[in-house]
Image: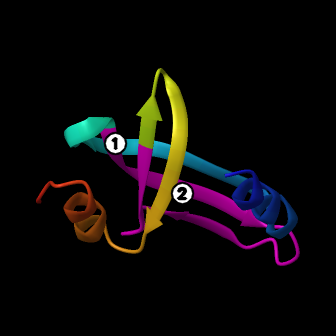
Amino acid sequence: MFRFAAANAEAFERFQLSPIEYSVGPGGKIVVQHHVSAKGRGSGVEWERVPDATLVWEVSDGKVIATTLYQHRAEALEAVGLRE
């Protein structure tokens, strides 16, 4: 997650993920679809959208222990044992 944040800090003047929908799968894995708001550092291009890419957060004892990015929401749901 730290590498992801560092790469975004280099590429974007502003990068914000806002959760808009989530599902909890077996074992406490959380599938979260986000709204992305960003502004390119070099280009100044602003970007607002809800991509199909989806994060799966694995939490244990109140702490995030793993985060996995899936290119498609359906893949993320399937990975944690859920369906659309």
Q: Nearer the viewer, residue 51 or 48?
A: 51
Crowd band around label 2 with a 10 angstrom C-alpha radius: few (<14), some (14–19), many (20+): some
- Magenta-colored stretch includes residue 61: no
Magenta residue span: 29-57
**Residue at left 34%, top 42%?**
30
Q: Nearer the viewer, residue 53 or 51?
A: 53
- Is 71 positioned to the left or the right of 28 in the image? right
Quadrant holding the C terminus:
bottom left
Mark found first going from the N terminus, 1 or 2: 1
Structural distance between the alpha carbons of marks 1 and 2: 18 Å
Q: Amino acid at mark 2?
A: Val
Q: Quadrant of residue 21?
A: top left
Give how far across and how far down residue 50 sits, in percent. Answer: 41, 61
- Magenta-colored stretch includes residue 36: yes
Q: Report helix, strand or loop for mark 1.
A: strand
- Is 83 positioned to the left or the right of 62 in the image? left
Q: Amino acid at mark 1?
A: Ile
Report the residue marked by disc 1. 30
Q: Which mark is residue 22?
A: none
**Residue at left 48%, top 21%?**
62
Task: Give the dominant element type of the magenta stretch: helix, strand or loop.
Answer: strand
Report the residue marked by disc 2. 36
Q: Nearer the viewer, residue 49 or 30?
A: 30
Q: Quadrant of residue 4?
A: bottom right
The answer to whether residue 32 is above or below residue 51 is: above
Give how far across and how far down residue 37 sits, in percent. Answer: 60, 56
Give how far across and how far down residue 67 sits, in percent. Answer: 51, 51
- Is 58 positioned to the left or the right of 63 in the image? left
